Image (cartoon, helix red, strand yellow):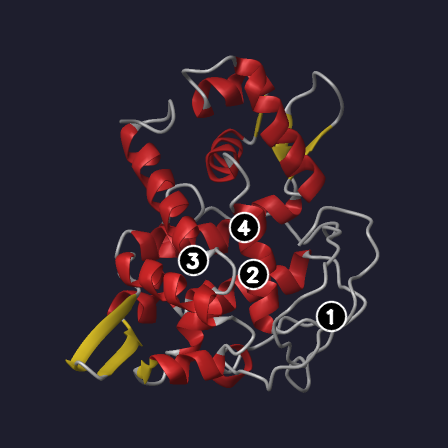
Amino acid sequence: MALTGLPPETDADITRVTEALAMITPRWNMRILLALREAPLRYSEVAAKVSWLHDGQLHPKLQALCEAGLVQRTEHSPRHVTYGITDRATALLPVLPVIVTWAETYLEKPDRPLSPIEQVEDSLTLLTRRHAAAILWVLKSREEASARFVAAQVLPDSDWTNIYPPLRQLVDDGLVETSGSGRPYRLSAAGDGLGSVLGALSAWSAGQPLAQAAHHPVWGRPTAGTGKRIWLSSPARTAPTTAPAPGRSAHSTPVWQRGDLFSHATPTRPAPALPAGGPRR
């Protein structure tokens, strides 16, 4: 069954990316995958790496990641069970620095340094807004469109006015902009800059090499120049944070070393929440 009113191949692409985001965005999922990246671990070893999760929280997450095909449970004996990431999850890891680079470019810098994995988590949250992927696809394809046109493509079987809440959310998030009530909608520079991220997620979800992202029929197009940053506040966190890698500056595109993104700090009490003032991370 079609998800949107877009052409079948586009609808299938959006559906795959939406399903991929649903797998990896739930809180702590990416941290669990990173904890398993080096070698399979016993349950107790996984729990030690994500010690801020209670036992009752970790088990269902591991089970869900196994069902998604991102983690493999291997029973060596009744008393020896290990968990390790699959080839599918391993192929996802190179997508994460792409997300971090977008976050460093477009998200408003918070009052305290955020670790790369926090940047990934915050960026993924924006992309899992209701109907976000489909709306972004339509606006990238059209450059600008009325709310009624977007609704016809994204919600073909619904009252067209139902498109306004997700559109307003994307405007608040800084990914979409409009000149005012009744005016067309278009991608902001930040929304257009998501081309590398959504192209990479599309390639991964379709089982293609990451290099295919540059040839995506929609997101492979050149993006607009860096524009106004999105303001995002950050609520208090209950997971460990890490300091940014040495040598990074606010005006340079970071070159991510493997250890920068895939490191785990000793659990510490997180910093207080940043003042409110924009959509939540």
Q: Earlier in the sequence, mark 3 or mark 1?
A: 3
Few, some or many C-alpha atoms within 10 Å of disc 1 (few <14, some 14-19, many ≥20)?
few
Q: Which residue is found at the position 58% from the left and 15% from the top? A: 161
Q: Is residue 96 left or right of residue 2?
A: right
Disc number lying in front (1 or 2): 2
Q: Which residue is found at the position 36% from the left and 66% from the top? A: 62
Residue that label 1 marks: 251
- The residue tagged with tag 2: helix, strand or loop? helix
Q: Residue furthest left?
A: 77
Residue 224 location in percent, x, y? 61, 47
Residue 71 location in percent, x, y? 30, 68
| Residue 121 disc label | 2
Q: Is residue 273 left or right of residue 262?
A: right
Considering only vertical position in the picture, is 253 above or below 61? Answer: below
How far apart in space, not on screen, are marks 3 and 1 (Cα)?
Answer: 29 Å
Q: Earlier in the sequence, mark 1 or mark 2?
A: 2
Classify residue 148 by image quadrant: top right
Q: Earlier in the sequence, mark 4 or mark 3?
A: 3
Disc number lying in front (2 or 4): 2
How far apart in space, not on screen, are marks 2 and 4 (Cα)?
Answer: 15 Å
Residue 87 location in percent, x, y? 25, 70
Considering only vertical position in the picture, is 31 above or below 108? Answer: below
Under mark 3, the amino acid is: Ile
Q: In which quadrant is the N terminus drawn?
A: top left
| Residue 24 disc label | 3
How far apart in space, not on screen, are marks 2 and 3 (Cα)?
Answer: 9 Å
Q: In which quadrant is the C terminus drawn?
A: bottom right
- The residue tagged with tag 3: helix, strand or loop? helix
Under mark 4, the amino acid is: Leu
Considering only vertical position in the picture, is 188 above or below 103? Answer: above
Disc number lying in front (4 or 1): 4
